[in-house]
């Protein structure tokens, strides 16, 4: 599969504080794939999206779309790459025209026949049939999102960029809308980048994930690889509760050897809990229990260390004695180096 988008040595300095917002970013994306760019607020996610769209000028590096350099505002009369479409958080729908007209307006430069046919295609693809005459304010949050996607896809962009597409969607609707989004992008053979601070969203929709921390790219890989083999403790924590133990703690608690000057990471779901002592378990006391619906989150003190464990039935309450163990195959090992 050919490399469709390439980002090389990309750096951007904010004009007001002269500090790097993004520093030496390298990214690649294959045609037809979905890349999720994730990180905390202020990590540079939206800035990266605007640079790729040609809406900002990079200080260093280059962005290539199918081998062609993406120009910034300083290099062209109208900012933005004509074949890259951006969907921002608030959708930017035209409020005074109906659903059909919102899509058709994007095709105003084409013949009436093509415009009508393409608009109908977008209505079908984005599940908006029967909503043609409604104004944007009459649509649900999910319908507004699908209309924004229909508008963006109408001209068959080479790259679709979505900035926090699920931030304004109710939790109850989010799961279906995530699947709808993936289906629309894949059916239209579109290449897409999704910016999100929600790691769960990224795991379920992306072919690849790029992690940003304070303007630096920490890791880029498949969702499975990043979850099972995170590059740093920061990346590990983005995708759920983790326990971090030094060399001595690992040896004393679980008889697990890790290299000196390294840290072990153990996800909460990989701390096994039982109410009876068995081989290779260590006694502990539950000091806190959080009921989280599908599972319990237990805080278990053993010696001078408190570990977090996830259990999928009511294993213990506060004050109960339990027995814990760890499968060495699930222990992640990190160098003790600065991450940012």
Image: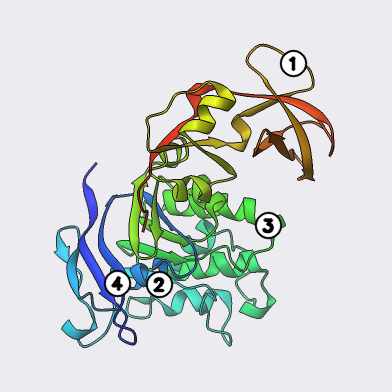
* Few, some or many residues within 10 Å of mark 3 (<14, 14–19, 20+): few
Residue 51: give its label. 4
> Could you tell me which secondary element the residue under label 2 belongs to?
helix
Between the C-alphas of marks 4 and 3, the distance is 31 Å
Of tags 4 and 3, which is closer to the observer?
Answer: 4
Between the C-alphas of marks 1 and 4, the distance is 57 Å
Front residue of 7 and 338? 338
Q: Which residue carries the number 2 mark? A: 115
Front residue of 207 and 306? 306
The mark that comes first in sequence, 1 or 4, is 4
* Few, some or many residues within 10 Å of mark 4 (<14, 14–19, 20+): many
Residue 214 vertical position relative to residue 182 in the rendered view, above or below: below
Q: Which residue carries the number 1 mark? A: 277
Q: Which residue carries the number 3 mark? A: 173
Residue 304 vertical position relative to residue 14 in the rendered view, above or below: above
The mark that comes first in sequence, 2 or 3, is 2
Quadrant of the rendered structure where residue 77 is?
bottom left
**Left of 59 or right of it: where is 301?**
right
Q: Is residue 153 visible?
A: no
* Few, some or many residues within 10 Å of mark 2 (<14, 14–19, 20+): many
Residue drawn at (58%, 79%) of the image? 98
> Could you tell me which secondary element the residue under label 3 belongs to?
helix
């Amino acid at each position: 599969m050919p490399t469709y988008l390439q980002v090389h040595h990309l750096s951007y300095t904010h004009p007001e504080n002269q500090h790097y917002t993004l520093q030496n970013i390298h990214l690649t994306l294959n045609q037809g794939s979905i890349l999720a760019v994730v990180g905390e607020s202020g990590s540079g996610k939206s800035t990266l999206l605007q640079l790729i769209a040609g809406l900002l000028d990079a200080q260093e590096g280059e962005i290539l779309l199918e081998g062609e350099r993406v120009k910034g505002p300083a290099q062209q009369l109208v900012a933005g790459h004509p074949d890259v479409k951006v969907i921002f958080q608030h959708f930017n729908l035209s409020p005074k025209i109906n659903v059909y007209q919102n899509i058709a307006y994007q095709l105003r430069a084409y013949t009436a026949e093509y415009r009508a046919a393409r608009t109908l295609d977008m209505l079908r693809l984005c599940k908006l049939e029967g909503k043609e005459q409604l104004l944007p304010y009459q649509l649900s949050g999910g319908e507004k999102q699908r209309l924004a996607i229909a508008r963006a896809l109408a001209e068959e962009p080479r790259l679709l960029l979505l900035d926090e597409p699920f931030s304004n969607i109710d939790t109850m609707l989010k799961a279906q809308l995530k699947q709808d989004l993936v289906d629309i992008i894949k059916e239209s053979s579109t290449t897409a980048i999704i910016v999100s601070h929600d790691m769960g969203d990224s795991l379920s929709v992306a072919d690849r994930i790029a992690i940003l921390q304070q303007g630096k790219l920490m890791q880029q890989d498949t969702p499975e690889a990043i979850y099972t083999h995170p590059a740093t403790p920061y990346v590990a924590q983005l995708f759920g509760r983790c326990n971090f133990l030094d060399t001595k703690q690992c040896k004393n608690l679980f008889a697990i050897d890790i290299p000196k000057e390294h840290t072990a990471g153990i996800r909460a779901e990989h701390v096994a809990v039982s109410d009876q002592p068995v081989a290779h378990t260590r006694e502990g006391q539950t000091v806190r229990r959080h009921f989280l619906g599908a599972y319990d989150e237990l805080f278990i003190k053993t010696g001078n260390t408190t570990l977090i464990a996830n259990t999928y039935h009511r294993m213990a309450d506060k004050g109960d004695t339990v027995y814990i163990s760890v499968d060495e195959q699930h222990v992640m090992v990190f160098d003790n180096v600065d991450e940012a």
